[in-house]
Image (cartoon, rainbow, N blue to C red):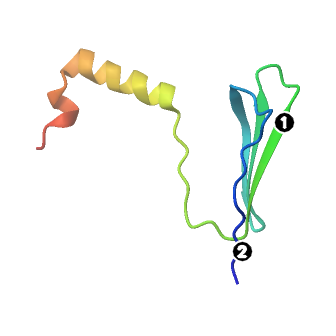
């Protein structure tokens, strides 16, 4: 049977954290984050099967959309065929 735990926010969590790595294997998914200066590591582990997840580099996505708009205009990616 699946067990759920209530999430309790971490008091001393840094304002800014960076994803160091994502490990997806037969045991589950592990996400490792660090703070700006690398003194603090935060590990998040999802046990067992994870149905899906998405990893998006928002900075690169924004640059791509900006390029498309500047080069081809907004209609290029917003209007249907």
Q: Is residue 56 left or right of residue 20?
A: left
Report the front residue among 5 and 20: 5
Q: Quadrant of residue 41?
A: top right
Q: In the rendered image, which quarter contains the N terminus?
A: bottom right
Q: Position of residue 65 (x, y in %)?
A: 34, 26
**Residue at the image position 48 percent from the left and 27 percent from the top:** 60
Tell me the element at label 2.
loop
Q: Earlier in the sequence, mark 1 or mark 2?
A: 2
**Where residue 56 appears, x then y in whole percent?**
51, 39
Measuring from the top left, give residue 24's x and y in whole percent. Answer: 71, 57
Q: Are marks 1 and 2 in contact (CB under 8 Å)?
A: no
- Give the camera-side residue of 21 and 36: 36
Q: Which mark is residue 3?
A: 2
Taking the image as shown, residue 31 lies to the left or right of residue 62, namely right
* Other-residue count near label 2 (Cα within 10 Å), few / some / many at <14 / 14–19 / ≥20: few
- Helix, strand or loop at disc 1? strand
Quadrant location, the C terminus: top left
Query: Which residue reaches farthest right?
Result: 39
The quadrant holding residue 18 is top right
Q: Residue furthest top?
A: 70
Residue 50: quadrant of the picture: bottom right
Q: Which residue is mark 1?
A: 41
- The 10 Å Cα crowd at callout 1, few under 14, some 14 to 19, many 20 or more, is some
Please determine whether, in this image, residue 4 is positioned above or below residue 36: below
Residue at screen point 24% across, 17% down: 71
* In the image: residue 55, left or right of residue 26: left
Mark 1 to mark 2: distance in Å? 26 Å
**Front residue of 53 and 3:** 3
């Amino acid at each position: 049977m699946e067990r759920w735990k209530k999430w309790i926010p971490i008091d001393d969590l840094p304002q800014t954290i960076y994803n160091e790595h994502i490990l997806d294997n037969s045991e589950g998914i592990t996400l490792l984050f660090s703070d700006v200066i690398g003194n603090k590591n935060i590990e998040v582990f999802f046990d067992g099967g994870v149905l899906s997840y998405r990893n998006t580099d928002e900075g690169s996505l924004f640059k791509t959309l900006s390029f498309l708009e500047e080069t081809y205009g907004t209609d290029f990616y917003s209007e249907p065929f």
